[in-house]
Structures are given as structure tokens and as C-alpha cells.
Image (cartoon, rainbow, N blue to C red):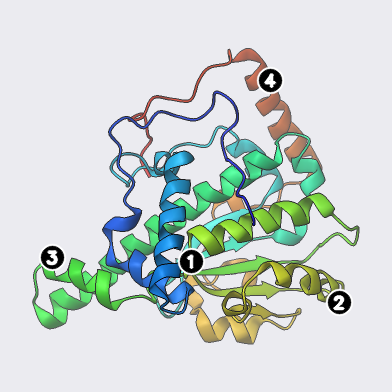
Amino acid sequence: KWQPLDIWGDGEKPELGGTRDLLSDCDDALRRFLNARNMHVDKSGQMLYDAQEWRIRNAVAYFMGPDGLSLQPDPEEPIYRALCPHAYAGKDKQARPIYWEKTGLIRVPKLLKHLTPQKLVKRHVRSMELLTYRMKRNAKEVVEGYLTSECKLDKKASTLIVDYATPDFLKQVVVMDLAGMSYAPDSKGIAVFRSCMKIDQFFYPERLGTAFIINAPWLFTGVWAVVRHFLDARTQRKFRILGSSYHKELRKEIDEANLLQCYGGKLEAPDSFIVRDDKQKGEILRDFTESQRTTAASSPPEAGSWGPY
């Protein structure tokens, strides 16, 4: 049986105090876990219990703060900005938030010079918590906007409708650009990917709407033959593997205003999506290393010290 990796190192896990994990507070969670187990109540109940236990054991609620609205800063953010071009930007035509990543430019061996596999997995969990927040916020805005203009219902009624009637709004779209993908086999990268995919399937079921894999080289056929076995059949069907002629497919799902400029749209990419040259990467990493050396080792911040998002 697969056992998830604990995401905190020794002495790193924060104390949440009175912070309460809200996984089971929403009917959306019940619906997602039931769908993930084909409406089998006992299996769904066990899956939900296991997910809640995992969240509590790993203090997952820490990432979005006691109010669920404030993203905890990541002390390793400079490393990801230097070595992992990514962006949380835009929505598709179904109003689902989009995560963009230049996956082909990410070199896991370079990351592992600065981070442990455990920290890479923790970063993924943090990202899933942020994306979950974006989905819920987005669904609330879309439904409230519709109800205000069309139905004239109050906010309490709109919240109920978000919980019961908008499963598609509560999913995400992922665009992974494989341009520049390394041809060297990367067993460590595959191991991290496997851990992240297992976490998504067991603890964040039914959060993925569509995953576009663009600029996929011929080599990826062999890679996909391996990694697809980490995914259940339902999740495999959500992946769309595209080569360099991906523009038409993307435009079917994402309008011009929400498509990043580098892919032919009008949306400006945030700073985190900029590809740094070797000199810029070196400067960022040197600054980060120096700051780590000059900062005394300390325990994680007390719950309540979240920055605004």
C-alpha cells in the first residue's frame, strides 16, 4: 500500500493552535470523494477519513492561514523563481483557474542541489492549497455575479449554490510546456512526480479539469508510457498530449484575454513565469544561499503570521 511522504522535516512542522481543517465542512468535498470512488459510500468514507488524517498530520491548513485566505510565504520561493518558471494566471472558458508551467525547462537534479525531495513535495501541497482557494474564490465570484444580475438572490443563497451546483468551477486547468525537455532519464524527477500525483489522487480528488501537455517531443511518448501508470483511468482521460501545433486546441478552451502572450494571447505573464538566463539564475541562487547563511536557524513562524494574498 502506498504511504505518503510526510511533508515537514524534523522540527519544521508548525503548530496550528486553534486552526481547524475545513476539508469535510463542504458538500463539495463529499461529492468529489464519492465521484473518485464511483459512488461507493464505504470506500469514499475511508478515502475521506484518510485524507483528513493526512491533512491534520501534515498541518496542511497552515499554508492558507487560519482564515483560509492568506498564503503563507514560501522561504524557498527564490529557488522556484530561478529554476521553475510557473504562473497562476487566467481562467478558461468554463471559468476554471489556470496553472502554467514551463516543465521542459525544469531540471530536477539542479533543484535537488538546493532542496530535498520532501521540500519539492511540500511545495506541491502548498500549490494545491493555493489552487483550491483560487477555485473556491472564483466559483463564488462567478455565481454571485450571475445571481446578482439574473436571479436577485442574496449571498447566503449563492454560497449554497456554489457548494451544490458548480463542480466544474471547482476544478483547475493545467498547461505544462515541455519545450526544452531533457533527453536524459531522470529517475529522481519521476519519483517526485509520482509522489505528487498520488497525493493529488488520494487527497485532492476531482480537482483536475484538463491538463494540456504542449510542445511534447517524440521522447515524451516513452515517458508518458511510464508515468501514466501512476494515474487512475479517470485522471488519464483528462490529459491532452499535444505537440508544437497546440494553438488551436488551447484556443478552444482558453480565450485570448486569458491566454498568456507567449502562447499568442493578450494576458501578460507574471514575473514567476520569466525564463532567467544562467547569469540571472546564479545571482538569485547566490543571494538565496547568502541569506540562508546569515539568518540564524529558527522554527517555522507562529500560526497567524501569514502574509496577504
Q: What is the three-letter code of the residue carrying label 3?
A: Lys
Which dot, 1 or 4, sits closer to the camera?
1
Q: CA distance from mark 4 to mark 3?
A: 49 Å
125 lies above or below 217: above
Quadrant where the N terminus is found in the figure: bottom right
Quadrant where the C terminus is found in the figure: top left
* Residue matched to label 4: 290
Labelled disc at residue 205: 1
> Helix or strand or loop: what does disc 4 sit on?
helix
Closer to us: 44 or 223: 44
Q: Relative to residue 164, is residue 94 drawn left or right?
A: right
Q: Earlier in the sequence, mark 2 or mark 1?
A: 1
Residue located 65% across and 44% down the image: 120
Dot 2 surroundings within 10 Å: few (below 14), some, or many (20 or more)?
A: few
Dot 1 surroundings within 10 Å: few (below 14), some, or many (20 or more)?
A: many
Q: What is the three-letter code of the residue carrying label 1?
A: Pro
